[in-house]
Amino acid sequence: MVNYLIFRKTRSLRAQIFNRVALPSVLLYRDLFKNNKLSWGESRESLERFSEGTLGKQLSNFLYENSIDLQPKMENHDVFHVILGYNTSLPEEAALHFFLIGNNKKSRYAKIAALVGFAIFPEYISLYRSAYRRGKNTCHFTSWEFKDLLFMEVNQFREDIGLADRKD
C-alpha cells in the first residue's frame, strides 16, 4: 500500500518529466523528419469556416478547447485526436500512439512516444492495450492526407474506416 501511495504521488513529477521530454522532442522530430512535408496553411480560426460536424470544424473546436494552435507540418496529429477521441492528457497521448502503431503507422516518433508513455505511466497498460487492438481492427488510414478531408463528417468517416467505440 505504501508503494502505491508513493507511486500516485509521483504522478505529477512523472507528468513534468514527460512534458519536458515530449514537447521538445515533437518539435525536434518535426524539424528533422518533416522537411519535405508542406504545412496546411490553416489555423484554428480558419478552420471555423467548416460546417458543424465536419473534421475541419471539430478540429477547430478541439484546438480551442485545449488552448493549442495548429502546429505546422504536425496537423495530422491533432486530426488523430479528433477522429480517435483521445484527449491530450499524457496517458491518452500515449494511447493515441499505441493506436497508431496498431494501425500500422511506421513513424519512429509514434514508437518512441508509446514507449516513453508506457515507461512513465505503466499503470495505464490496459488503456494502451485497448488502443493498440482498436488500431489493429481499424482500416489503415494513418498515412492519408487529411487536409483534403476536412469537409467530411467525422461520424461518417469513423464509420467508413470501421473505427470501434472506445471500451476503456
Image (spheres, rainbow, N blue to C red):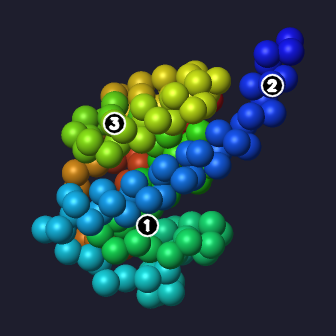
SS of the residue at dot 2? helix
Identified at 63% across, 66% down, the residue is: 66
Q: Give the side of residue 49 with respect to residue 42, left or right.
A: right
Q: Can I make out residue 141 in this image?
A: no
Say whether residue 40 is visible: yes
Q: Which residue is mark 3?
A: 111
Q: Label 3 sits on what residue type?
A: Lys
x then y, percent, for residue 138: 34, 35
Of helix, strand and loop, which one carries label 3? helix
Task: Find disc 2 in the rendering and name its residue.
Answer: 6
Residue 53, given in percent of the width and then of the height, sits at: 52, 68
2 and 1 marks in contact (CB < 8 Å): no
Q: On screen, 147 above or below 140?
A: below
Q: Residue furthest left?
A: 36
* Amino acid tagged 1: Leu
Disc 3 to disc 2, how far (Cα)?
Answer: 28 Å
Q: Total of numbered circles in the picture?
A: 3
Residue 21 located left or right of residue 38: right
Q: Nearer the viewer, residue 112 or 73?
A: 112
- Please tell me the numbered disc located at residue 118: none
Location of residue 89 in the rendering, given as x and y in whole percent from the top left corner: 62, 49
Q: Which mark is residue 55?
A: 1
The disc, 2 or 1, on the residue closer to the chain's N-terminal end is: 2
Tell me which amino acid carries mark 2. Ile
- In this orientation, which residue lies closer to the viewer: 156 or 71? 71
Which tag, 1 or 3, sits closer to the chain's start?
1
On-image quarter of the C terminus: top right
